[in-house]
Image (cartoon, helix red, strand yellow):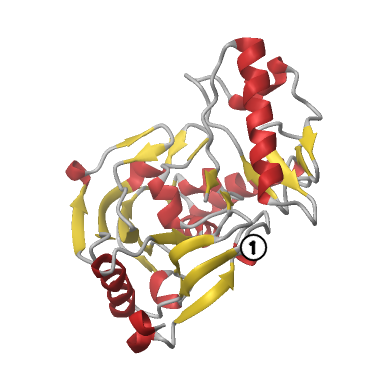
Amino acid sequence: MSLFDSLAHIVRENENLASYTRLNIGGNAEYFAEPTNQEELAGIVKVCHENKLPIRLIGSGSNLVVSDEGVNGVVLHLGAPAFGQIEVTDKGLIAGGGAKLTQFVSTAVREGFAGPEQMVGLPGTVGGALHSNVAAHGVDFGDWVRSAEVLTRTGEIEQRTAEAMSFSYGQSSLNELVILRATFEFEKESAAELTKAMQKLWITRRANQDELAQRSAYIFEDVGGELATDILQQAGVAGMSVGKVALAENDLNFLVAEPGADSSQVVELIAKVKQAVSDKTGIELQTAINLW
């Protein structure tokens, strides 16, 4: 591991990635790095850039399928406290990209910042939510961001103003390697009322999530305002499965993996469902799940 001799305390070889994903599927990373601070992170990225070594970022792994063959290069995991801090300001929050979305939501509600309560129960991190512009109940995560600090693939730290960022359905212009932190602003409302609203949403969402609580992942993007779930229902794919991977009964746009499932079964099921939808409706679904 001569490339990372100076960073050997935070870089491991042949780390299995399954436990870092919600589906609990996947092979090994050639190198796995868990930096404890921004300086170590930048150092790893620069070594990768100088040696043309592939580098990937793994967050909460809530919508990720890792190949059973593993992945080459370096996989970054930003689980250290330095990357998940949340600071309260007069107008909103400053949150690290590694902060859990659940913590972001609860902090906002406690401080009387309106909007994030709509996202109660969603998995993932702040960085992941920004990158994919997560939406819930007509509210987009990108609506609240005012600035962001990012780390490029060459190891440079850059600032992004609101004017320099763009957000659309399911995506954003924040495509750099790491979103280090972002500043958010919200409208103020009663913390007590926001708490009630959040609890009501959580009860409703939880009632539909029992099957999806573990080893599940969101599969397809919605199409032109039509929910992918409805398109799948129209195509008659309910009950479709491959091996130990199946479409969820409660929501067809989620797949559920039983113990013993592997990545090839996930890939095969996705292809099978896409083909069935295309044959039945003529719609070509785009995957929301990340396949490594």
Q: Tell me the quarter of the picture where residue 163 sits.
A: top left
Residue at point 68%, 37% (across, down) = 268
In the rendered image, the vertical position of residue 247 relative to residue 120, given as above or below? above
Say which of 147 and 49 sits in front: 49
**From what the image shows, is residue 246 above or below residue 178?**
above
Report crowding for label 1: few under 14, some 14 to 19, many 20 or more residues within 10 A (C-alpha): many
Q: Toward the viewer: 47 or 84?
A: 47
| Residue 291 horizontal/vertical position (percent) | 54, 46
Instruction: Residue 120: give x, y in percent of width and height.
Output: 58, 49
Secondary structure at numbered mark 1:
helix
For the point 57% across and 11% down, the residue is 282
Can residue 249 be seen here?
A: no
User: Which quarter of the rendering shows the N terminus?
Assistant: bottom left
Q: As rendered, which of 74 and 230 lies closer to the eye?
A: 74
What amino acid type is highlighted by mark number 1? Ala
Number of labels in the image equals 1
Which residue is found at the position 34% from the left and 80% from the top? 3
Please provide percent x and percent y for residue 110. 50, 60
Q: Which residue is mark 1?
A: 18
Percent x, y of residue 247 = 74, 35
Q: Left or right: where does residue 174 sit relative to residue 111?
A: left
